[in-house]
Image (tube, grey):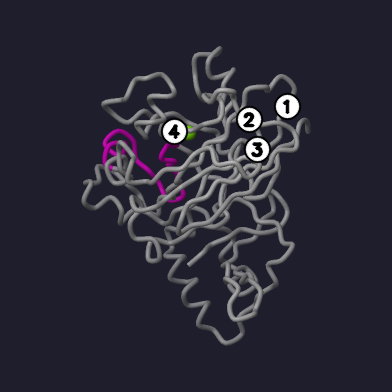
Amino acid sequence: MKLVRYGEAGAERPGIWLDATGGQPARIVDVRGMAFDIADYDARFWQTFGVDRLRGLLTEAGLKTLPAAGVRLGPPVAPPRQLICLGKNYRDHAEEFDAQVPAHPVYFAKSPSAMCGPTDPIRLRPGMVRVDAEVELAVVIGCRVRDVSEQDALACVAGYTVLNDVTDRDVQAQRLQWFLAKSADTFGPMGPWLVTPDTLPDPQALGLRQRVNGALLQESHTSNMLFTVAAVLADVSRVLTLEPGDILSTGTPGGIGSTRQPPVLLRDGDRVECEIDGIGTLCNPVIQGD
Ligand code: MG
């Protein structure tokens, strides 16, 4: 199942994406129109077996849907309590970044306020000149997770989506931390939907790639992660309790634009695509200014 949130930024409604089939264009199920108590894809939704409710809605005779064409999608889940990211979780990216391959997962926080939709503009503010895109598999947590074993960890996953971990390399280098470099407004395009684990059982079996203006920059496979989704959930939940709706993004492979010769930096008018097989593609224009 593909969960989407649609409508104006900040006022999105929960929906279910129905792919185009047999000449019928794609449609979106108006979840709130059918189940008024499902306000959003938030912590309460995951705690109250929301996906089972959605499966029930799909079997109802009077399915309320709208045409998907022209409808803005937002991030596929409500703003989370926390958005935890991994740095240097692919060997080739660790080598291009600072040549140090980590022995343990490297964590940092990205502000959830950076999140935006799968076709929203990435906005470069004045002074942002060395900005990169990073394609990443993001994992949404579906239950409380504390001291989970690696073996049981994937049972705690509500679904998978694509995150573009947009990064200001100048801020990252000059300010000696990552949070500010990765938390600018619009620096977290996410979506286009959340894919539930029943249709995506193995998060380590996915090709992923990034293109800028159609040119391929990153291409890898989630089997190349240094630390798997299950290993990371086991590791981080030994220290802090994860709650339903929390998001963990699993790092980016090598090939980022800023390390190329000559560098490929995001500029006004660019189009960035981040794609993961079995999930979908983000396609965000880059705009200079507000
Ligand atoms: Mg990243």
Is residue 202 rendered to the left or right of residue 70? left
Q: Is residue 235 magenta?
A: yes
Residue at the bottom extreme, as displayed = 61
The circle on residue 189 is: none
Residue 46 location, x and y as percent?
Answer: 44, 58
* Viewer-side label of 1, 2: 1
Residue 288: give x, y in percent of width and height.
76, 31
> Mark 3 or 1 closer to N-term?
1
Give the residues drawn in magenta, as a range. Answer: 234-254
Dot 4 or dot 3: first in sequence order is: 3
Residue under label 1:
125
Q: Earlier in the sequence, mark 4 or mark 1?
A: 1
Q: Tag 4, which secondary structure?
A: loop
Name the residue that disc number 2 marks. 184
On residue 186, the disc is: 3
Q: CA distance from mark 4 to mark 3?
A: 22 Å
According to the image, label 4 marks what residue? 254
Q: CA distance from mark 2 to mark 4?
A: 22 Å
The main secondary structure of the magenta stretch is loop
Q: Do tag 2 and tag 3 residues touch (Cβ < 8 Å)?
A: yes
Badge 3: residue crowd in 10 Å (few <14, some 14–19, many ≥20): many
Is the C-beta separation of discs 1 and 2 under 8 Å?
Answer: yes
Up the image or down, 101 lies above or below 55; here it is above
* Residue in the picture at 33% in, 50% down: 204
Near mark 2 (Cα within 10 A), the count class, few <14, some 14-19 or many ≥20, is many
Which residue corresponds to the image point at 55% horizontal and 46% vertical from the top-left? 274
Residue positioned 50% across, 82% down in the render: 59
